[in-house]
Image: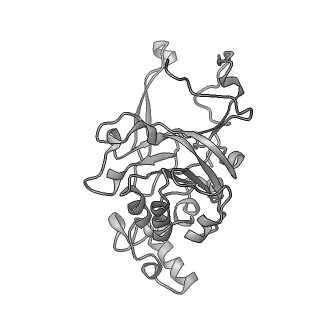
Amino acid sequence: MIDTSNYPFPPKATTTPNWPMGPKEAGLEFVELSHPWGLGQPCWPYFEDVKIERLHSMSKSRVLTQRITTVMHSGTHLDVPAHVVEGTPYLHEIPLQQFFGTGVVVSIPKGKWGVITADDLEKVTPKIEKGDIVMVNTGWHHHYADSAQYYAYSPGFYKEAGEWFAAKGVKAVGTDTQALDHPLATAIGPHGPGAPNGLCPWACEEYKQEKGRDVLQDFPEWEPCHRAILSKGIVGFENVGGDIDKVTGKRVTFAMFPWRWVGGDGCIVRIVAITDPKGTYRIESGK
């Protein structure tokens, strides 16, 4: 996991304001579910590094202005239907309410190459209900890094889980792994842009040695969970992390708004879980 505590740049703030908060909001608890993002950002194996340039700096201009070059599928981010299903909505066509609502953070611990099944999803606590936003904590966010372990060895969803989410009618799905699908059902395996040998052929060979079966015997379809949920308008979140352990096993309110990007296929996003221990907070009536 990226640790920003020892970064030499940017320098730490020397003054901290007394951040203002209204009296009602003061009783709420806000929990970060996104990984830190910046230079040295872990990237999907076929993406270029994030580039951050200072066009103005304090030493030169007495003002800081930065330019970022990145793909939007970077760090904790959103996948929208148009990302994988032709003819489906782009980011700007998705209603705002899809990025806010109640749901659950559930624990489904899995190790190297584990597959999350429908049975796993049925047994979680709190129970997943129709219309829920669902965040799954496999424990893999603790391995978040520019590493083979995180990208090639992670557990994940496959076709069965995707079809379960679609049948349940959930609102959104998030995972603390590298993608909405098991890595060997992505281009890391022998699928899509990475075919025929995949982006990490050594991982496919290692899988065969460990399991005694070719990857395509166990993962014959390319990103079937992506397709199962996104085709139904269920948006997905990848690389969920931050302090997810603090709210695992709880029912919470999520806020996770992306940019208003016309034609967007995905977006870097900050996911926040909100709880109200006193149970007194209410949204304004608009009157």
**Residue 18 or residue 285, whichever sits in front:** 285
In the image, is residue 205 above or below residue 268? below
In the image, is residue 131 above or below residue 225? above
Residue 114 visible to the viewer: no
Kindly identify the residue that appears in the image at 38 percent across and 39 percent down: 95
Q: Residue furthest bottom?
A: 212
| 111 sits left or right of 96 in the view | right
Kindly identify the residue that appears in the image at 63 percent across and 60 percent down: 138
Residue 48, given in percent of the width and then of the height, sits at: 40, 49
Residue 52, given in percent of the width and then of the height, sits at: 45, 34
Q: Quadrant of residue 282?
A: top right
In the image, is residue 237 above or below residue 65? below
Residue 129 visible to the viewer: yes
**Residue 242 or residue 165, whichever sits in front:** 165
Q: How many marks?
A: 0
Kindly identify the residue that appears in the image at 50 percent across and 60 percent down: 168
**Residue 58 or residue 113, whichever sits in front:** 113
